[in-house]
Image (cartoon, helix red, strand yellow):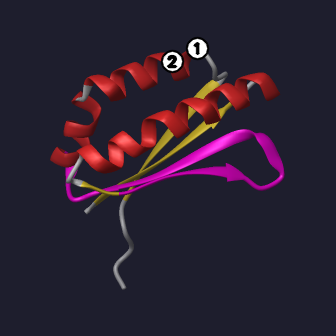
Amino acid sequence: MFAIAVRFELPDEASAQAFDDLVARTVPGILAGEPGTVVYVPHRVDGEPLARLFYEQYTDRDAHAAHEARPETAEFLRRVRELVTSVRAELLTPLAA
């Protein structure tokens, strides 16, 4: 299992709305077209209206690499770069139970 959390900071409400619209158009294709993607959930951050956070879980690192290699993902990331002020990705390792 491989997981990642990605936080996006947006400069204003118009950018946040454009980001949310882009996500609404993109996420269904990710869920339908990527068998190695287990969880792909965008979130709003409570108390921070200009922040978004994605929690992503993949069967393994190869599944994540396949996600990143899709042309749709590249286009999404290109458009996101035009909307955000910063992006922070955290690679996650589960703690032993």
Q: Of the residues shown, which amino acid type is indicated by label 1?
A: Glu
Give the residue number, with chain letter if any, for mark 2: 79
Whether residues under marks 1 and 2 lie with C-beta atoms below 8 angstroms apart, the answer is: yes
Residue 3 visible in the displayed image: yes
Q: Identify the image quadrant of the C terminus.
A: bottom left
Give the residue number, with chain letter if any, for mark 1: 82
Q: Which residue is at 64% across, 23% downward?
A: 84
**Is residue 8 highlighted in magenta?**
no
Q: Which residue is at 83% across, 52% downward?
A: 47
Dot 1 falls on a residue whose secondary structure is loop
Categorize mark 2 by other alpha carbons within 10 Å: few (<14), some (14-19), many (20+): some
Q: Of the residues shown, which amino acid type is indicated by label 2?
A: Arg
**With 41 as the anchor, is 70 left or right in this view?**
left
Categorize mark 1 by other alpha carbons within 10 Å: few (<14), some (14-19), many (20+): few
Indicate the position of residue 36 as horizontal and vertical percent values. 21, 53
Eyeballing the image, is 3 above or below 30?
below
**With 16 as the anchor, is 58 left or right in this view?**
left
Dot 2 falls on a residue whose secondary structure is helix
Q: Main secondary structure of the magenta part?
A: strand
Indicate the position of residue 72 as horizontal and vertical percent values. 33, 26
Magenta-highlighted residues: 39-61
Eyeballing the image, is 38 above or below 42?
below
Q: Residue furthest left?
A: 62
Q: Quadrant of residue 87?
A: top right
**With 3 as the anchor, is 49 left or right in this view?**
right
Q: Identify the image quadrant of the N terminus.
A: bottom left
**Is residue 40 highlighted in magenta?**
yes
Q: Which residue is at 34% across, 79% downward?
A: 96
How many angstroms separate mark 1 from mark 2 (CA)? Answer: 5 Å
Indicate the position of residue 20 as horizontal and vertical percent values. 63, 36
